[in-house]
């Protein structure tokens, strides 16, 4: 029980058990490490560790402490300013929602301390080292304790790529997917890229949640936007993927159906046969399609992708090639996308953020393995060399580790 609670609340050697939970329920105020020395009572554990452990031991459900639970120490009575000489390095002090600034102004609005002095490293460390479910609980606890919206508070304190990463981290996965899909359809002109990525790589429940969030946030069905913003084979492909009608995995290998699909694809080379490609690639389960791809190559002497390149053009060709890549090896598909996002003079931060966040709790380790195998350099090293600015630490932390 204690091990699970310690993992949930967040343990840090500088702050002791539970400082992640304390961050969850407090405003972020830049201050000094000596505050703890001034206000912390003597006890065997560093910085209230033992008291938080006692709280965790009493909470079998792993929930965050209630307001009535023991609290870490308050602000330093000396009220030191940032930059005082002779002090240890800054640590984020987590001050009660009725903070000094808010109390002085007689209101409880967003703390002015959430500004240029906020400890970005602490924010990144907490948010990137929690699961999405835990981040939602942190945001709820922050709201309950301070009556402030954590997302809005951090948006006011941050900017640029780091702000966008923090927003993505704090949003539910379905809402992030919906926003990215909407942007791809309406603004960026990347429907064949991002659309296939989201609609073809999410599980059926995730896809349904994404479509529901899309309708809730934008007051329109995603399928309606697909119809109005795309056309031809790309439109049919995205609509078929959004329908979520792909067959589930079966332990029974249907060799007859595989042969029928191969023959259908071989014959679908004339006009008005695009629907056959869309039907087979969006309805059959991936294991079946891998067998179809292998059998197609044996029958024709070339890979199915070769036929796609000669048979289709433009965004339809790109979408079908992406879908084939997802079917063959999803981890390699994402490794290729990450590599491409790092190739330009200015990295594609939106793609890096979207992929690292969405895959961090599923198959990121497999993606890192495929990246290193194909490109001879680890994803971590590639990010470290290409990414600049205050979002660099966040992306590196999401990547997790170097692959030797």
Image (cartoon, grey):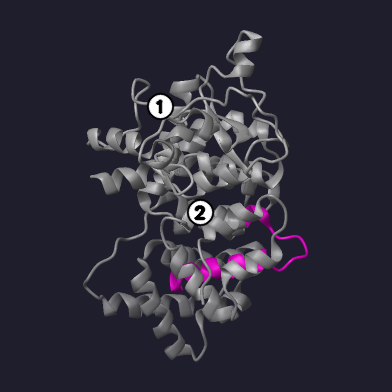
Is 333 included in the stretch rendered in magenta? yes
Q: Where, by quadrant of the figure, is residue 122 drawn? A: top right
Where does the image place residue 137, in percent across and percent down from the top left? 40, 35
Q: Residue at x 53, y 30 (%)?
A: 38
What quarter of the picture does the N terminus occupy? top left
Where does the image place residue 325, in percent across and percent down from the top left? 51, 71
Please give left or right for residue 33 compared with residue 263 in the image.
Answer: right
Give yes or no for contact between labels 2 and 1 (Cβ–Cβ under 8 Å): no
Q: Residue at x 57, y 38 (%)?
A: 33
Who comes first in sequence, dot 2 or dot 1?
Answer: 1
Instruction: State the residue in front, 263 or 17.
Output: 17
Instruction: State the residue in front, 137 or 310.
Output: 137
Where does the image place residue 374, in percent across and percent down from the top left? 55, 80
Q: Which residue is mark 1?
A: 71
Instruction: State the residue in front, 318 or 391.
Output: 391
Local crowd size for mark 2, using a 10 Å CA cut-off: few (<14), some (14–19), many (≥20): many
Please give left or right for residue 63 compared with residue 73 in the image.
Answer: left
Residue span colored magenta = 325-351
Tell me the element at label 2: helix
Q: Where, by quadrant of the figure, is residue 246 drawn? A: bottom left
**Secondary structure of the magenta portion, mostly?**
helix
Q: Which residue is mark 2?
A: 198
Depicted 196 relative to depicted 57: above or below = below
Local crowd size for mark 1, using a 10 Å CA cut-off: few (<14), some (14–19), many (≥20): some
Is 391 included in the stretch rendered in magenta? no
């Amino acid at each position: 029980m204690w091990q699970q609670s310690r993992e949930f609340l967040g343990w840090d050697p500088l702050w002791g058990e539970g400082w992640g939970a304390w961050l969850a329920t407090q405003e972020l105020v830049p201050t000094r490490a000596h505050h703890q020395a001034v206000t912390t009572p003597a006890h065997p554990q560093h910085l209230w560790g033992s008291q938080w452990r006692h709280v965790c031991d009493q909470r079998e459900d792993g929930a965050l402490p209630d307001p009535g639970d023991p609290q870490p120490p308050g602000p330093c009575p000396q009220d030191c300013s940032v930059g005082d000489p002779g002090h240890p390095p800054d640590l984020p002090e987590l001050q009660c929602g009725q903070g000094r600034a808010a109390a002085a102004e007689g209101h409880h609005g967003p703390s002015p301390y959430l500004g240029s002095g906020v400890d970005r490293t602490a924010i990144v460390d907490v948010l990137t080292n929690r699961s999405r479910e835990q981040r939602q609980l942190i945001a709820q606890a922050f709201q309950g304790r301070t009556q402030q919206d954590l997302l809005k508070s951090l948006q006011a304190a941050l900017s640029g790529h780091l702000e966008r990463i923090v927003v993505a981290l704090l949003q539910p996965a379905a809402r992030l997917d919906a926003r990215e899909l909407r942007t791809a359809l309406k603004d960026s002109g990347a429907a064949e890229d991002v659309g296939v990525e989201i609609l073809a790589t999410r599980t059926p429940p995730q896809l349904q949640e994404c479509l529901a969030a899309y309708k809730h946030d934008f007051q329109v069905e995603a399928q309606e936007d697909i119809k109005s913003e795309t056309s031809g084979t790309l439109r049919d492909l995205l609509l078929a993927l959004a329908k979520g009608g792909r067959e589930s995995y079966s332990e029974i290998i249907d060799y007859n159906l595989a042969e029928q699909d191969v023959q259908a694809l071989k014959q679908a080379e004339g006009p008005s046969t695009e629907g056959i490609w869309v039907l087979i690639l969006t309805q059959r389960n991936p294991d079946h399609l891998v067998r179809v791809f292998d059998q197609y190559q044996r029958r024709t002497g070339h890979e199915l992708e070769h036929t796609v390149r000669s048979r289709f053009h433009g965004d339809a060709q790109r979408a079908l090639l992406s879908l084939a890549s997802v079917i063959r090896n999803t981890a390699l598909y994402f490794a290729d996308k990450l590599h491409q996002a790092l190739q330009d003079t200015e990295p594609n931060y939106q793609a890096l953020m979207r992929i690292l966040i969405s895959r961090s709790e599923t198959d990121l380790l497999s993606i890192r393995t495929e990246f290193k195998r194909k490109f001879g350099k680890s994803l971590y090293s590639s990010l470290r060399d290409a990414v600049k600015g205050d979002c660099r630490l966040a992306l590196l932390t999401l990547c997790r580790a170097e692959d030797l």
